[in-house]
Image: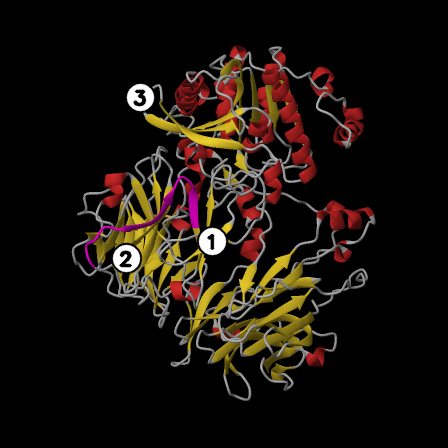
Amino acid sequence: LTPDEPPSGPPRGIRLAFTPDGRFLMAITFPSKAEVDAAKKARKKAAEMPRTGLLILDTSSGAAQRVTNVKNMQVPEEGPALVAFLKEPPAAPEAKPGETRPPYGSDLVLRILDGRAGERTFASVTEYALATNGRTLLYAVSSRKEEENGVYAVETAAAAPPAALLRGKGKYSKLAWDRGRRRAAFLAARGDASAPHLYLWERGAASPAAVAAPDACQDSYQLSDNGAVSFSRDGSRLYAGCALPQPPQPDTGTPAEDRVIADLWHWRDDFIQPMQKVRAARERNRTYTAVWHIDQKRFVQLASRVLPTVLLNDVGTQAVAIDDRPYRRMADYEGAYADHYLLDTRTGERGVAFGRLRTGSTTALQWSPDGRYVLFYRDRHWYTLAAPGGILTNLTSGIDAAFYNEDHDRPEPPTAYGAAGWTRDGRVLLYDRYDVWLIDPEGQAPRNLTEGYGRRNHIQFRAVRLEPPHERRLGIDPARPLLLRAEHLHTRDTGFYRDRLQGSEPPVRLLWGPRNYRALSRARAADVIALTASTFNDFPDIQITDSSFARLEKVTHANPQKAGLLWGIAELVSYRSADGVPLQAALVKPENFDPAKKYPLLVYIYERLSQNLHNFADPRPHTSINASYYASNGYLVLTPDIVYTTGAPGQSALKCVLPAIDAVVARGYVDENAIGIQGHSWGGYQVAYLIGHTQRFRAAASGAPVSNMTSAYNGIRWGSGMPRQFQYELTQSRIGGSLWERPLQYIENSPVFSAPNVRTPLLMLHCDQDTAVPWYQGIELFLSLRRLGREVYLFNYNGEEHGLRLRQNQMDYTVRMQQFFDHYLKGAPAPRWMREGVPYLEREREKEAFTAPHAVSSK
């Protein structure tokens, strides 16, 4: 129900990596749908299904090598052109009842890609780690021959056999290198031990040293292999995780069918039972940060159940300890808060407190690269806290500019515009609405780095960080030019500017145009920058340029099939809400648009959407209308901005959406008898509200709507286990108070109470496993409209969640929604499911007929 919670799971990402010389490109590949479908049809087991692979592309010749069954891969940051990749393990025979087996490793392949091309394979590997210079490869073995288990090191440029750093029966894991490649670390539980030791290996040493035993942690905590192992930036400190041992589950001898299974909801619990259930696995495997000070040979546990979270500075001398225990119950209705303390990593002693801060926002705490200051946002201002002295400084109180989001229209504290980060010389770059400010915590006068150019020209500047992650940790280099992405907040034109931290010149424009420019990366050893440029009609192909941005060269052509399709063109529409607020909407027209014709209009709503003007819309099925698909089929598509007044979310939508429609209708090319509206989640709620307060729409589709805020207020978001109270009082629903404080607002903004006014045919989507908006919310609206004799349809794709995740269901609903709108907005015949329904006993046969290749829209 929130913008940062997509209606379905994220698509699988394709990991790309270049070798240090830029000659070879590595990409993880996925099996084709045809391969997966064939395996399913053959009823193959999960372990026998097609798996991910690896593509190795020689960019100089275009030659490609493919490797099947690759689990993951690593490429060094510098040094020789090589790749290490771990193969998927072969399918193991099924275990016998009661039998437990350790997770055995699989083949690790080291392939040299330069002129010395060659390949070596190492068996039974579970983990591996390449040094950043690519010269040494560490790997851990878990073999059926237990005596071969261990951690091994191999020099990648030599043919010598691997050297066993530690070997023998046991479990070896969490391999880590320091940045200087001088040291490596890992965990090892040798023999039959259940808890590991922490080992440190100095390069050149014959064997590693055990620097911390399992009981090095405090009290009854033990070292745990659930936690990561890593080094501080300078390599002087080594981090690991401690945990409380899990007691064995008692065997009571009671048959499963006779066991009592019940939860107690106690009013003093920190978190309610559903939240505890969702977090159970995480809590069971939780570890608490500890540090080994290498030079002092001192082990200190920093975190515990009392202070469960610590945020370390890069040099490892100080940390921020975070304690949310006093405020956990407040998460039900007000949001997440925590107390914060400075923590000395050498002693583990808690230092100066800097109070209760709201957590979970986009303004996370940031340490300066030298570890002297921590930056944080609170109460509309940015602060630094000096470590270890604890001096608190408000950085923005004396500046005549707002550093909080001035468009924030929820009854909760506004978020910050954000921060570009620290510079290497200890200053920080902060954002107001338009410009970038350079601020020194030592007390020098703050400076508007972009010289007010952004505010004068309605251009929003944001810093672009193209350096690799290990360099980014060092901070922004003040000696180098600063690249800025710029966006005009009225026209949505974008581009890039260059500025400098020294001097007082305004930023210099490098590239500008009516499209969405995004920088991707910079070459390590050449003046080459990769970027994308999209419009609604232009796919975001990769283009390259140099730091002058004088010439762009398109290097990919990833969507050639688009050339054969009618698409659409997008433009901005300016209008005012019924309250006089200036707003914008993005209007998509068919590519062959004729202003003399009358077109059906489809409105899609959520919150503010005009900023997506230049985003390319892939024509893919999903839970909502697809703008390029509908424009290609002769529709106008309008996505208006909505702003809100506390206590009146439904009325706010009405005051913003109808004037946007009026502004487009006034242009003369809209068929006023063919206007439809669709939205999902928060958009679905607003659609359900609107059709109870206006007859403007000929047809409407509402996905996963809250229909009754009075019954939803005390519900549970089952995905997270959180109570729903907070979102009605302070966040997206924006009522501004509890149900008993503002009962009339809850009723007035609930679509179910205006059901008698509905005359618009309504198509609903609400699935029975929705973990964000309870399914009963859709049922309440459906049953209300059904009793009143209103035309309403409710699709429930069994087992689906807040948004449709299965491709076949996405396809099915996309076609049905188009049939629904085509019938009411274009006069197409009503499909059979609208005319007659689908009886339960016929539902499977109906879906087969509906999805057959010969199926047409009138079926």
Q: Do we see residue 530 in this rendering?
A: yes
Along the polypeptide, which appears first: circle 2 or circle 1?
Answer: 2
- Answer above or below: position of 397 versus 687: below
Local SS, label 3? loop
Return the residue at label 1.
553
How would you rate the neighbour count of disc 2 (Cα within 10 Å): few for under 14, some for 14-19, many for 20 or more?
many
Local SS, label 2? strand
Which residue occupies the foreground of this view, 484 or 705?
A: 484
User: Residue furthest toward the bottom?
Assistant: 206
Q: Do we see residue 743 in this rendering?
A: no
In the rendered image, residue 41, in percent from the top left (x then y), is placed at 81, 46
Q: Which mark is residue 328?
A: none
Local SS, label 1? strand
- Answer above or below: position of 487 versus 688: below
Tag in front: 2 or 1:
1
Q: Which mark is residue 428?
A: 2
Tell me what residue is drawn at x 63 percent, y 26 percent. 817
Along the polypeptide, which appears first: circle 3 or circle 1?
Answer: 1
Magenta residue check for 515: yes
Return the residue at label 3.
580
Along the polypeptide, which appears first: circle 3 or circle 2?
Answer: 2
* Amino acid beneath label 2: Val
* Amino acid beneath label 3: Gly
In the image, the segment drawn in magenta is 503-518
Tell me what residue is drawn at x 44 percent, y 33 percent. 609
In the rendered image, residue 153, in percent from the top left (x then y), is placed at 59, 81
- Give how far apart the Cα atoms at labels 3 and 2 are: 38 Å
Magenta residue check for 205: no
